Amino acid sequence: MAIVGQKRSALPVPYAMDPEIPDRVRKERYFDPDFYQLEVELLWPRVWQMACRLEEIPSPHDFVEYEFLDQSVVVLRTEDMAVRAFQNACRHRGVRFVQGRGTCEQGFTCPFHGWCYGLDGQNTGIPRRKSFAEHNLEPGDIDLVPVRCEVWGGCAWINFSDDAPPVRECFEPAATILDAWKVESLRTEKWFAGRLPVNWKLAVEAFVEMYHVVQTHPQLDIPGMRYSLRPGAPFDPRSFIDAEIEYLRVMSEGMDGMVHANDVRVAEGLRDLALPVGPQLAISTWNRALNDAVIRWHRERGADIPDINELDAQGFNETFYQCFPHYFVLPMYSSASSYRFRPLGPEETLMEIWSLTRFPKGEDPGRPAPPEAWEADDPRWPPIPTQDFSNLPRQQKGLHAKGFEYMRLNERLEGHISNLQRTVDGFLAGLPYEQLLPALRLVNVAPFDKPILDLGF
Ligand code: FES
Ligand SMILES: [Fe+2]
C-alpha cells in the first residue's frame, strides 16, 4: 500500500519510513545508536516536553528539577504564581545548583562557592566578587539561562527551540477538547515510574493500539460488552450492563485507577437501569445515564467537572490523546491516566503513569511524592502494566534477530505507529514547523485503531 495523495519519496533520514510501504518499520529505528543520536539532536530539542505537573509546584518558591538526557532544567513558581524555567547550571563553574525538588527561601545558592540567583534567574550575589575580572561579571552573562516554558493542561512544558509554535498550538485539536473536559482540574492521586529496557518508541507503541488487548490482556475481553458485540448477534441489555461494569472494574483494578473506583461505584448503582433492546440505543442510553450519574456524584461533592454528555454530543469523546511525542492523556468518565516517556539511552526508557482525578474544593491532595522507578518485572506493578511490560523487553530483544528486518503493521489497527514514526522522520529531516504542525494535529487525537494517514510529507 502507498499513502494516497501526491507521490513522495522517503525523507533523507537513515532507516526512513518508506511512503510507498508505510506499514513497515525498520528495526534499526529502535536501537541504532546513530538514529538515536539524530533524535537527540533533531527531535527532542524541538518538541514540547512535559516538565512537571503543576501540583508539584503549588506555591511561590516551589521548584522541581526536570532531567532529560544530559540536560537538567529547574522549573519554579514565582512570587506572582507564574512558572519559569532555567538551565540547571551555575554560571560560575557549571554545577547543577539544585537536585530533585523543594522550596527555596529567596532564590538559589550554588553549593560549590555560593553564587546566588533570584527567582527571576538574576545573579544576586558572588562571594569575593572583587577578585573576578570585569569581563566575568558582565550583567546578564552571570544570570541563569532561561528555558522556554509554558503552562497548559495542568502541566508545565519546556521547549529548547525558540521557533516552536506555542504549546497549545502543537497539541491541537487535543488541547481544545481536553480544555473543554477541564483537564486542568485534575490532580495526581497516584504516580508510578518504571525503567523499561526498551527504546522509547517501542514503549510508546505498546500503548497506542487495541490490537494486542485480546492476547495480552485476556481479562479485558469480556463477552457481552460493547467491544465484543458482533453485528447481528443476539443482544441482551442485562448482560450488556453486567459486562460493561465488569470491564470498568477490571480496568480500574488492573491499572490502579485508569477508571476511577468512584466512577465504578457510580456505574454499579445503575446496574438495574432499564435499557432499550436494540444494541445501539442501549449503548447510547447507558452512556448518557452513566455520564449523568458521574457528573452528579462529583458535583454533589463540589468537584469541578464539565457536562460530559454535552462533550459527547460535540464529538469530544475520545479516550486517548497524545501530546507528541512523549505525553498522553487517557480520559475515562471523570478521571484520567496519563503517561510520560523519557529515553535514558537507545534501549532504555523511563515511563511514568499518573492516575489523575477531580477532588472537591478544599480537599486538594497536595504535592505528590515522586515515585521510585521500578523495574519492568517488579511484582508491585498492577496487573495490566505487568502484562504489557512482560512483552516489551522480549520485543526489544527480538528486534535484534538477524532474520528480522522490519515490523509489519496492521494498516487499519496499528496505523498510529506508522503516523508516529513518519512524524519523527519529519523532525529528523528538519522540516519547518509549518509542515510539522498539520502532522501533529493528525497524530495527537485518538491513536487507537487509527489508519495510516497522509501527513503531508
Ligand atoms: S560552581 Fe557555582 S558557585 Fe562555583
Ligand atoms: Fe496493553
Image (cartoon, rainbow, N blue to C red):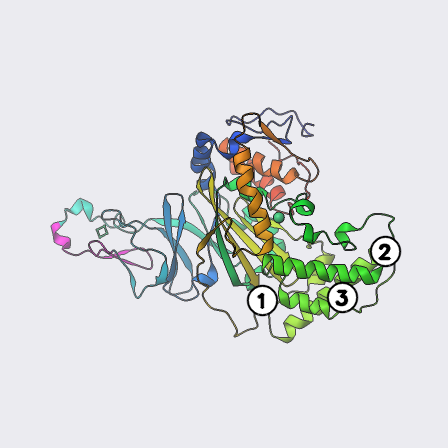
User: How many residues crowd mark 3 within 10 Å: few (<14), some (14–19), many (20+)?
Assistant: some
Q: Is label 1 in a helix, a strand or a loop?
A: loop
> Where's residue 442, x and y in %?
63, 42
User: Label 1 belongs to which residue?
Assistant: 358
The amino acid sitting under disc 1 is: Arg
The residues tagged by marks 3 and 1 sit, at their Cα atoms, a distance apart of: 20 Å
> Where's residue 31, x and y in %?
48, 33
First in residue order: circle 2 vs circle 1: 2
Q: Which residues are magenta?
A: 111-131
> Where's residue 49, x and y in %?
47, 48
The residues tagged by marks 2 and 3 sit, at their Cα atoms, a distance apart of: 19 Å
The amino acid sitting under disc 3 is: Ala
The residues tagged by marks 2 and 1 sit, at their Cα atoms, a distance apart of: 35 Å
First in residue order: circle 3 vs circle 1: 3
Report the front residue among 451 and 175: 451
User: Label 3 belongs to which residue?
Assistant: 289
2 vs 1, front mark: 2
Q: Is label 2 in a helix, a strand or a loop?
A: loop
Q: Is residue 294 left or right of residue 96?
A: right
User: Label 2 belongs to which residue?
Assistant: 235
The residue lying furthest to the front in this view is 379
First in residue order: circle 2 vs circle 3: 2
